[in-house]
Amino acid sequence: MYPKKPFEEGEYQYRRLISAADKLIFLGISMNIFLKSRSKLLSIMMLIIVSILLFATGTAYVIRGTYYMVTSAGDFEMRWVEEHYVFRGKNPFDIFERHYAELHGNTLPQIGRDNSIDSELGPITFGCYPPWSYFTGAVFTWPPTRTLAKWYFGLINLMLLSSLLIWAYHLGFKDGTMMALFFTSSLLATSSICTTFEVGQYGVVVLSALVASLCLDRKNRCGFAGLLLGVAMIKVTLSGPFIIPFLIKRRWKALIVMAVYIGIGSIIVFFATKTNPIEMLQQMVRAAETYAFEGQNFMMYLLGKLEVGTGSAIKMLACLVVGATIILSYLCRSSSMLTNFAIAALASRFWTYHRNYDNIILIFLMMALGVVALRDNSHLALASFFVMGLSLWPPASLTEIQVYRIFQYAAWFGCLSVLLMIEFKHYPASSLKNRSDVSNIKRGRGEKWETAGL
C-alpha cells in the first residue's frame, strides 16, 4: 500500500470524527426517546394507581353513604316531614316556630293558620327551606312512609351520581381514556358525597341540576338550562350564587325561565299553605338565625366573635360575598362558564351557613382546574387540582379538626387564585373589550377545550 498523503489522512480522520459524532447524536436521541417513553410510561402507571385508589375510596364512600341513606338520613326525614305538612295544607315554618316556642318556654306565635303538630308526623326541629323548594321537593318526598321515601331518594341519588361521573369522564376524555377515568375517580372520591348521602341532603340533586344546566347552556338550550337552574334552587343556600354567571353572561332567557319556575312553585305552595311567599321567606330567615353560627364557615364565625347580631351577620356576609363574586365574575366574563361556576362554587360555600357535606359544591373548582391543566398543559393547575383533591378526598371526619379545616380554607382560596391567574393569562385584559363571552371562539392550543364549552 502506498502511504496516505497528509490531505487524505486529514480527510479520513475528519470522516471518522463525523461518524463518531453521528453515532453519539443517534445514541443521545435514542436515550432521550427511551427516557421520555419511560417517563411517559411511569406517568401512566402512576395515573392508573392513583385512579384505582381514588375509585376504591369513592366506592367505599358510596356504599357507606347509601347504607346510612336508607337506615337513618335524619335531614331527609325532616324534609319528608315538612313536605307532608305541606301536603296536609300546613305551613312547615308555623310548625317549627310553635315547637321552638314550646321548647324554650316562649309565648306561642299568634297566627290565623292551623299550626297544630300532627302526632303521625311529629314536630319540625330544625331547618326550613324557601317556598318553591317544597314544590320541587315533592318529587323526592311523595312516598307515603319514611322508609319507602328513603329507598326512593337513595335510588334517585345513585342515578344522579352516575350522571355526574359521566360528566367528569367527558371532561377528561379530551385527553384520553386514562385521564377521563382519573377525572371520574376524582369526583367519586369526594367524601362530601358520602356525607350528603348519610344525612340525606339535597347536595347531589343540586350539583346534578347545575351540571345539567351548564351542559344545556353550552348547547344553547337556554330555556331548559334555566329550568334546571330553577330545580337547583331547591337548596338556595347552595345554588344561589350560580345565578351570577348567567347574569354576567347575559343568559336572559335562562334567568326568566328560572324566575317563572320558582314563581309558579311559590304560588302553588301559597295556595296549599295559605301563606304568601314573602312571609314564608321572612320565617325562613328567622329559622336560620337559630343555627347560623353553628356551621363550618369561618367568616360567619368571625362575625360572631365581633358580636354582630345573627340577623345582621347573615345579611352582611351574603352582601359581601355576593358583591365580590359579581366583581370576579365580571372580570372573568370571557372565560368559560365552568370557570365562572368555579367562582360561584367558592362563593356558595361561604356566603351563608354551611356544614361539611356542602363541600360537594367545590367539585366545580376542582374540575375547572383539571380542565385548565389539560388545556394549557399547566403543571401549576395540575398541582392545584391535587391540592383541591387533598381538601375534598379525605374522610369528612377530618373537617372537625381545626388544623385541617384551616388547610381547606387556604387550599380553596389559593386554588381559585391560581385558576383566575391562569385564566387572566389565557384571556388577556385587552381581549375583554366588547366581548361578553368567547367560549365559542377557537384560540389555538385551547381550541378543543373552548369548543367543548368547558
Image: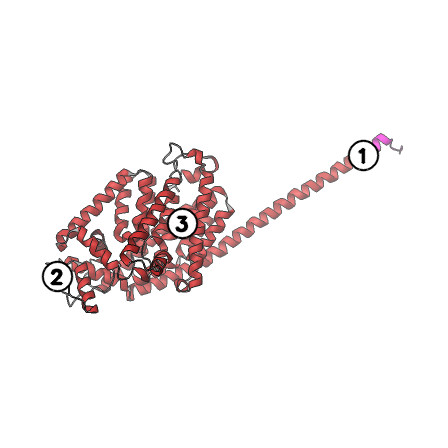
First reached walking from the N terminus: tag 2 or tag 3: 2
Which is nearer the eye, 295 or 87? 295
CA separation in Å, label 2 and label 3: 46 Å
- Determine crowd level at label 2: few under 14, some 14-19, many 20+ residues with C-alpha closer than 10 A: few
Image position, residue 380 (x, y; %):
50, 48
In the image shown, does 106 or 72 lie closer to the viewer?
106
According to the picture, the residue beneath numbered tag 3 turns out to be 365
Relative to residue 214, is residue 76 depicted above or below?
Answer: below
Residue 140: assigned label = none
**Image spot of residue 156 (x, y percent):** 28, 56
- Where is residue 435, by image quadrant? top left
Mark toward the viewer: 1 or 2: 2
Q: Is residue 356 left or right of residue 287?
A: right
Q: Is residue 76 magenta?
A: no
| Mark 1 or mark 2, earlier in chain | 1
Extent of the magenta region: 1-10
Circle 3 Cα neighbour tier, 10 Å, few/some/many (<14 / 14–19 / ≥20): many
Give the mark nearest the N terminus, 3 or 1.
1
> What mark, if any, has residue 110 been given in the picture?
2
**Residue for point 49% across, 54% down:** 48
Quadrant into which the C terminus falls = top left
Question: Left or right: where does residue 114 sit relative to residue 425?
Answer: left
Residue 410's quadrant in the figure?
A: bottom left
Mark 3–mark 1 CB contact (< 8 Å): no
Query: In 3D space, how far apart are the residues under numbered discs 3 and 1 (Cα atoms)?
Result: 65 Å
Circle 1: residue type: Tyr
Q: Which residue is mark 1?
A: 12
Magenta-span inclusion, residue 2:
yes
The residue depicted at 30 percent of the width and 45 percent of the height is 243
- Along the viewing direction, whichever of 319 and 63 lies nearer the viewer: 319
Secondary structure at badge 3 equals helix
